Structures are given as structure tokens and as C-alpha cells.
Amino acid sequence: MEETIKTTFFGNIAHASPLGTLSPEQALELASIYMDNSSKAKDPGVVLVLCHDTDVALFQAKRHIKPDKNPILAKKIAKAYVDLGHLLMDHRQAKGAQASFRRARRLGYVLSLPISLMGDTL
């Protein structure tokens, strides 16, 4: 297993992760599963854990691609970050939502959101 150290909107995490063995497409599929479950969860704590898992899976998906060489996959990952951002906003996690929206923009996704939701780094 690969040890990953990553900064998320939940802070720094270090863990041995089998996610490192997944292809970007598989990691994106896993992120989608986490996202689906987080939208169905009732408990806010469970929602945030699933959002965190979604963020980690998306990080794994994007770390092995170059947006200019795989624009279709980059667009799918960016869209997933936007969806995650909206879910986080729904749960009053503005900083996490802003981080997700920034990641989507870095992958070339054009956002039409109020400036206050995008964060201070445009």
C-alpha cells in the first residue's frame, strides 16, 4: 500500500491507502459512490465523513492525469469537485466548498457562482 499525505479541507491526513492502486477512472467511480451515499445520508457527521472520502478519491483520480492530455477525464473530475462543493455548501461547510470549487477551476471547469462562494483566489 502507498502512504499518502494530503491536505484536504479537513486538514492534513496521512494514511496508507489502497486508493493509490486504483486507476484515475476507478478512483473517480469510487468518488461517485461516496458522493451518492453522502447525498442519501441523514446524519451530518456521516455526510462529512463521506465528503472527506469523496475528496480523497478525487485527489487520487486527478493526481495521475494531465488535464491537457486527458481533457474528458479532467472535466469529469472537475464536475465531481463542483458537485462536492455544492453538497458541502448545503451542509454549511463553506471553506470546504470553496476548496472544491478552486480544484474544479484548476482543472479548467468554468464556474458561474457568486464570488463569495469561489473564495479569494480566482
Image: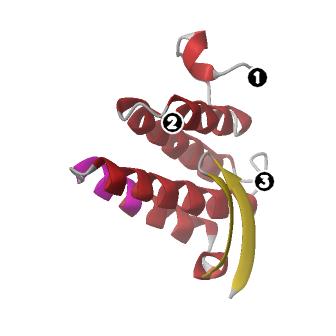
Residue occupied by mark 3: 66
Label located before the other in sequence (3 or 1): 3
For image coordinates 74% across by 47% down, the residue present is 67
Label 2: state its secondary structure: helix
- Percent x, y for residue 92? 41, 30
Give the alpha-carbon distance from disc 3 to disc 2, as whole Å: 19 Å
Label located before the other in sequence (1 or 2): 2
Amino acid found under the numbered disc labelled 2: Val
Q: Which quadrant of the structure image shows residue 98? A: top right
Tags 3 and 1 touching, CB below 8 Å:
no
Amino acid found under the numbered disc labelled 1: Thr
Residue occupied by mark 2: 82
For image coordinates 49% across by 61% down, the residue present is 53
Give the alpha-carbon distance from disc 1 to disc 2, as whole Å: 16 Å
**70 sits left or right of 101 in the view:** right
- Percent x, y for residue 23? 62, 73
Please say if 9 is above or below 57.
Answer: above
- Percent x, y for residue 44? 31, 47
Residue occupied by mark 1: 121
Q: Which residues are magenta?
A: 34-40
Q: Which quadrant of the figure contains the N terminus?
A: bottom right
For image coordinates 72% across by 60% down, the residue present is 6
- Point out the frontmost of discs 3 and 1: 1
Please say if 40 is above or below 1.
Answer: above
